[in-house]
Amino acid sequence: MVIDSGEHILSKQPPQHIAIIMDGNGRWAKARNLPRTAGHQQGIEACKRAVKSAGELDIPYLTLFGFSTENWNRPAAEVNELMRLLRMYLRSETAELHRGNVKMQMIGERAAFSPDLLTLIENAENLTKDNDGLNLTIALNYGGRDDILRAASNMALSMKEQGVEPSFENVQEHFPSYLMTKDKPDPDILIRTSGEQRISNFLLWQCAYSEFIYTDTLWPDFDKMDMQKAIEEFQGRDRRYGAIEVSK
């Protein structure tokens, strides 16, 4: 614990889960007169640094927004490059993640991906599934609205098959177990890089009480110091979850 100049007690509780919207690859490249693909390539290096940093900072859960359901609307050449980089990352980093005791999982709708890419994803998940270090989640073809709609649909079907009468209390208790993040705590921190200040359809349900932290740093430049700054800002915030502290 630390007391600030206003005698307000700030918690030094470390975050359990950091989620990151990785933004700014294109602007990073443009500022250097490079093609957007160069920015995405450097973005992969930033992903590696983020995973390493989270492990060194003892963060149990890290979720990276790699590719959204809306990203398919980008030019075909850029989408193909992103898929190429994803393949490259999985081929080069899966063994390294395993050596680092990282458990990697993917959330998102898988049907749109090519069979060879799905094989790489599944191989990474299977190889690392028993690791008990950092829990790394990569959101691919993921959308928060899609997650909620699929969860609602699956829950309704399950309740119908079981002959369970829906009620507010029943839905409230069990709904989170139908989300793609069912085995993960909600993010304590949502970081968005590049200065943009929107959630972009990412973890809409899960971020209901997350602390939003925006940084002007472009994703390819994001490093351990940036993550530490976000953690320090988080630790200085007063999280009340809608309640207030009653004076004694």
Image (cartoon, rainbow, N blue to C red):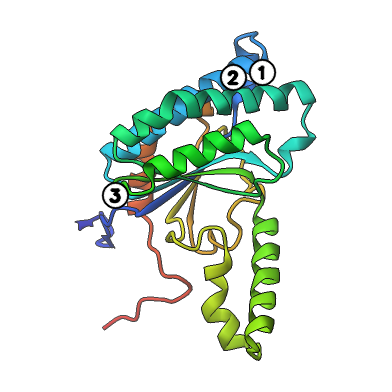
Is 183 located above or below residue 172 in the figure?
Answer: above
Is 97 located above or below residue 10 in the figure?
Answer: above
Residue 21: x %, y % from top left: 55, 41
Q: Which residue is mark 2?
A: 39
Is 121 located above or below residue 187 in the figure?
Answer: above
Query: Within the image, what quadrant is residue 169 found in?
Result: bottom right
Which residue occupies the extreme top position in the image? 33
Residue 217 visible in the picture = yes
Residue 21 visible in the picture = no
Q: CA distance from mark 2 to mark 1?
A: 5 Å
On the picture, is 170 further left or further right than 184? right
Residue 194: x %, y % from top left: 57, 32
Q: Residues within 10 Å of mark 1 (few under 14, many from 20)?
A: some
| SS label for mark 3 | loop
Query: Within the image, what quadrant is residue 22 found in?
Result: top right
Which of 74 and 6 lies nearest the eye of the viewer?
A: 74
**Which residue is rendered at x = 52% and y = 80% of the image?**
173
Residue 56: x %, y % from top left: 26, 37
**Which residue is rendered at x = 56% and y = 80% of the image?**
172
| SS label for mark 1 | helix
The kind of residue on which mark 2 rests is: Gly
Q: Which residue is mark 3?
A: 132
Q: Which residue is mark 1?
A: 36
Q: CA distance from mark 3 to mark 1?
A: 36 Å
Residue 37: x %, y % from top left: 64, 17
| SS label for mark 2 | helix
Q: CA distance from mark 3 to mark 2?
A: 32 Å
Q: Residues within 10 Å of mark 3 (few under 14, many from 20)?
A: few
On the picture, is 97 further left or further right than 74? left
